[in-house]
Image (cartoon, helix red, strand yellow):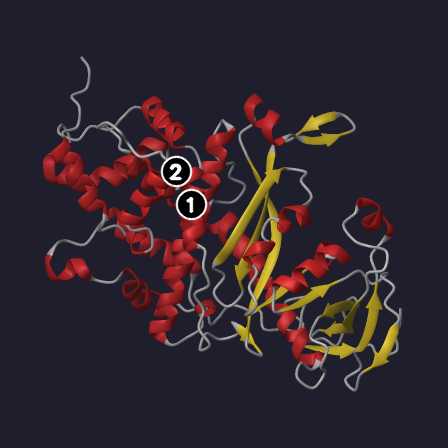
């Protein structure tokens, strides 16, 4: 016998109860409605699973990545099932849920993420700013996806001399705010996509109050010049083999160098033959607690004044790039799960699931940033795992109506996380790139 359709009254109560979930703090129902309307994916007729419910379901798939899709939907509908009874609120089949997800695609999730991915740190946030610049970093990673023909066709496979091997992968590049680890932008492509090329899609998100940190893989003359025009300042690592002859040696051991584009950039039309720019170079070796030294590190920056930005300070600032690495660990290990493959079998749902994870991670990180503000501490002192558990509890056991219903999710996380600060863990305030370095030793004698 066909399932009795969910009544419009029941659907209305569903959306009302969803507003009690923790994710609604930063993904309010009105914003979701606007995203669905802007992308023309809102539900035109009454369905058992409305489009707005599907949006929250996809975010929950990230928060409960170890549970099946239907189990996530049961969790989402549980408050309503307790209120009206299990028979009145049916759970759609897996096929119906997949059809509902495919109707939405990834467009509304991209819109929601772009609206949510905004800086949240204030000048009082520890290690979020340097000399008035908001410190941000860019980095990339990969995620394994289901080994289906559609995914292999869209994202490719890992090529070896024996042929394709392993799961297909999607390459992801994220720009994040270092002080809070809140993502500010995302670009993705096939598994073997050129990571700096994906970053080029994020350049319009740079602002004049930002200091951008990047690893040595990202430098080329055209990209450096474009980012220098877009951002307030740059501090990038470069290869030690790069020729950077000194034009002027500064008092702190750093020096100014004049660089020009590589011939391949000129041939491709990205740069002109007469293009030149001046940058500042500093080199050092991280010194560890036992007295041993790490490999030589070379940084270049647009901050040319050694008195306003001393070399030793810049070394410690560049150490904050590890916040992006730590963010990937939180996203891939603690939120998604170790070695877990994304569950979607077709490319459009892979993209949707990817943005579902980004939305969930951003919600957690913004919640932690607000909690840290209330606790007057650094967001890095709060436990990411505990924050995820707090949000999961708020979804599974939403607060009842009345005075308790208005309790702030951030306030709850602050009180809970406040007793679970990561003070016993090793913090990444060291002088970079190795996170456990205790000091640095400059190498003024090296000139390339």
- Assign the C terminus to one quadrant of the image: bottom right
Left/right placement of residue 4 relative to residue 44 reads left
Label 1, residues with CA under 10 Å away: few <14, some 14-19, many ≥20: some
Observer-nearest of 436 and 277: 277
Q: Is residue 317 above or below residue 97?
A: below
Image side of residue 336 versus residue 251, left or right: left
- Density class for disc 2 (Cα within 10 Å; few <14, some 14-19, many ≥20) is some
- Secondary structure beneath label 1: helix
Q: Residue at x 29, y 35 (%)?
A: 73
Q: Position of residue 347 (x, y in %)?
A: 52, 30
Give the alpha-carbon distance from disc 1 to disc 2, as whole Å.
Answer: 8 Å
Residue 12, compared with residue 237, is above or below; it is above
**Can you say whether 32 is above or below 416 in the image?**
above
Q: Earlier in the sequence, mark 1 or mark 2?
A: 2
Which residue is painted at 68% across and 29% down in the image? 165
When asked about the image quadrant of residue 133, the answer is: bottom right
Can you give x and y, in whole percent of width and height, for residue 258 in the image? 83, 69
Q: Nearer the viewer, mark 1 or mark 2?
A: 2
| Residue to which mark 2 is pinned | 39
Q: As rendered, which of 357 and 287 lies closer to the eye?
A: 357
Residue 236, image quadrant? bottom right
Q: Position of residue 150 (x, y in %)?
A: 55, 23
Q: Which secondary structure, mark 2? A: loop
Q: Viewed as shown, does residue 330 lie left or right of 77?
A: right
Of residue 446 and residue 198, the one placed in the foreground of this image is 198
Residue drawn at (87%, 74%) of the image: 246
Can residue 181 be seen from the camera position used here? yes
| Residue that mark 1 sits on | 111
The answer to whether the residue labelled 1 contacts the one labelled 2, judged by CB atoms less than 8 Å apart, is yes
């Amino acid at each position: 016998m066909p399932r009795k359709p969910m009544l419009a009254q029941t659907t209305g109560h569903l959306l009302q109860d969803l507003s009690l979930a923790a994710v609604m703090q930063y993904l309010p129902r009105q914003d979701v409605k606007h995203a669905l309307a802007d992308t023309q994916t809102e539900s035109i007729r009454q369905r058992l699973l409305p489009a707005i419910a599907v949006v929250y379901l996809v975010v929950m798939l990230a928060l409960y990545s170890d549970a099946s899709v239907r189990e996530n939907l049961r969790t989402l509908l549980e408050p309503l099932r307790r209120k009206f009874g299990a028979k009145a609120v049916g759970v759609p089949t897996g096929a119906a849920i997949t059809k509902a997800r495919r109707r939405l695609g990834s467009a509304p999730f991209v819109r929601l993420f772009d609206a949510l991915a905004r800086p949240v740190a204030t000048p009082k946030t520890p290690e979020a700013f340097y000399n008035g610049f908001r410190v941000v970093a860019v980095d990339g990673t990969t995620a394994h996806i289901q080994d289906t023909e559609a995914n292999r066709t869209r994202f490719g496979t890992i090529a070896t001399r024996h042929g394709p091997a392993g799961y297909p992968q999607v390459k992801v590049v994220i720009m994040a705010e270092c002080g809070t680890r809140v993502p500010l932008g995302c670009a993705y492509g096939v598994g073997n996509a050129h990571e700096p090329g994906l970053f080029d899609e994020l350049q319009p998100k740079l602002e004049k109050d930002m200091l951008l940190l990047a690893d040595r893989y990202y430098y080329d003359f055209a990209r450096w010049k474009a980012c220098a025009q877009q951002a307030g300042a740059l501090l990038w690592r470069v290869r030690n083999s790069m020729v950077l002859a000194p034009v002027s040696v500064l008092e702190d051991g750093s020096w100014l160098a004049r660089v020009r584009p590589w011939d391949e950039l000129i041939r491709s039309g990205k740069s002109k033959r007469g293009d030149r720019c001046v940058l500042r170079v500093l080199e050092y070796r991280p010194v560890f607690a036992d007295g041993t030294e790490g490999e030589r590190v070379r940084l270049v920056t647009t901050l040319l004044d050694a008195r306003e930005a001393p070399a030793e300070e810049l070394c410690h600032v560049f150490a904050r790039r590890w916040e992006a690495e730590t963010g990937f660990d939180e996203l891939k290990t603690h939120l998604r799960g170790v070695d877990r493959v994304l569950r979607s079998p077709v490319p459009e749902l892979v993209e949707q699931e990817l943005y579902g994870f980004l939305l969930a991670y951003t919600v957690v990180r913004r919640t932690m940033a607000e909690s840290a503000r209330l606790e007057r501490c650094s967001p890095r002192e709060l436990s990411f795992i505990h924050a995820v558990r707090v949000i999961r509890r708020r979804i599974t056991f939403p607060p009842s109506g009345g005075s308790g219903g208005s309790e702030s999710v951030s306030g709850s996380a602050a009180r809970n996380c406040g007793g679970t600060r990561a003070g016993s863990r090793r913090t990444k305030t060291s002088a970079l790139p190795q996170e456990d370095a205790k000091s640095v030793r400059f190498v003024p004698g090296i000139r390339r």
